Amino acid sequence: MDRTENVVELQNVSFAFTNVSSGEYESMIIGGVSFAAKDGEFISIIGPSGCGKSTLLRIIAGLIAPRSGKVFYYGKDVNGPTDGISFVFQDFALLPWLTNIENVKLGLSSSGMEEDKQDKRAKELLDEFGLSGFERAYPNSLSGGMKQRVGIARAIASQPKLLLMDEPFSALDALTANSLRADVMYMLRDKDISVSSVVLVTHNVDEAVELSNRIVVLSGRPSRIKEIVKVDLPYPRDKRSNEFMALTDRIYNLLTK
C-alpha cells in the first residue's frame, strides 16, 4: 500500500502507562488501533471516558511515543513533533503573559518568517476569527470562545496540512460552541487555508455527526476500534433530519452496547 496517499495513517498503535520505579508496563490503555485520513477528510474519534482518545491524538502529534505500532504522516514515520501537524488543545493553552497576537505568532516561531510578516499573518488570522481590535489585549480579557479562536488561529498560523483538535468545544457554552464549529467548517473550505485533514477527539455524538466524514468509534480500555462509521450527509447538516438522527442513534448504540 502506498502510504503517501494518506495524510496520516495509524498502524496497530498501542499504548500503556509505565510504573515509574520499575519502568515496566502496567496499564494498557490503547490495544491496537489502525485507521487513516485522506486529503480533505474530517475524522472524529469518539469513545467512552478513559479509553485513551486524547492520548491517541498526542501519539499522532508525536508528543507521546506509542508502546507499539506506527504513525505515518504522508508516508513518513512520526517520531516526534512534525512540521505540518498542528494541535488545538481543550484548555486553550494560551500563555497569559503574551498578548493575543503574540500567542498566535508562537505558531510561526520556527518558520523563519520576518517579524513584520509574522505580525501581518497573525493579524489576518485574528481578523478572520472575528478578533479585530483584540490583537494587543491579553487572554484574560477574552471569553472562552474568543480564547479558543486565538488557539485555533495559532494552530493554523504555520500552515499545517493536518490539524488535530482535542475536544476544542467542550469547555464552551452550547451557543458559543455552535458558532465556533461553524467558523471551523467555514475556515476549512477557505482555499487560502492550508489544512487538508482534521482529526477531532470528542465525546459529543451530535458534534461528531455534524462535522465528520467518518467517525472512529472506540471501545473501552484497552481501546480498539468497534466500527468506523461513514457520514455521507451534505453540509451544512440538519440535526433535525431523520438521517442525522439515525446516525446519532447508531453511534450511541455502538458506544453503549
Image (cartoon, helix red, strand yellow):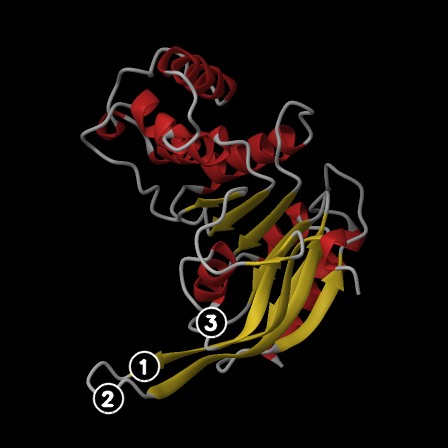
Q: Residue at x 23, y 27 (%)?
A: 98
Amino acid on which the number 2 mark rests in the picture:
Ser
Q: Residue at x 44, y 59 (%)?
A: 58
Mark nearer the N terminus (2 vs 3): 2
- Which numbered tag is attached to residue 22? 2
Q: Is residue 132 above or below residue 27?
A: above
Location of residue 227 in the rendering, given as x and y in whole percent from the top left corner: 70, 72
Task: Give the image quarter of residue 257.
Answer: bottom right
Q: Is residue 223 above or below residue 247?
A: below
Camera-near label (1 vs 2) is: 2
Instruction: Decide if residue 228 is in sight here.
Output: yes
| Gap in angstroms between the C-alphas marked 2 and 3 | 18 Å
- Secondary structure of the residue carrying numbered label 3: loop
Location of residue 22 in the rendering, given as x and y in whole percent from the top left corner: 24, 88
Mark nearer the N terminus (1 vs 3): 1
Q: Looking at the rendering, in which quadrant would you find the N terminus?
A: bottom right
Which residue position holds label 3? 66
Q: Residue at x 49, y 39 (%)?
A: 177
| Front one among 163 and 254 | 163
Which residue position holds label 1? 18
| Gap in angstroms between the C-alphas marked 1 and 2 | 8 Å
| Gap in angstroms between the C-alphas marked 1 and 3 | 12 Å
- Lateral position of residue 118 relative to residue 235, left or right: left
Amino acid on which the number 3 mark rests in the picture:
Pro
Q: Residue at x 22, y 80 (%)?
A: 20
- Secondary structure of the residue carrying numbered label 2: loop
- Secondary structure of the residue carrying numbered label 1: strand
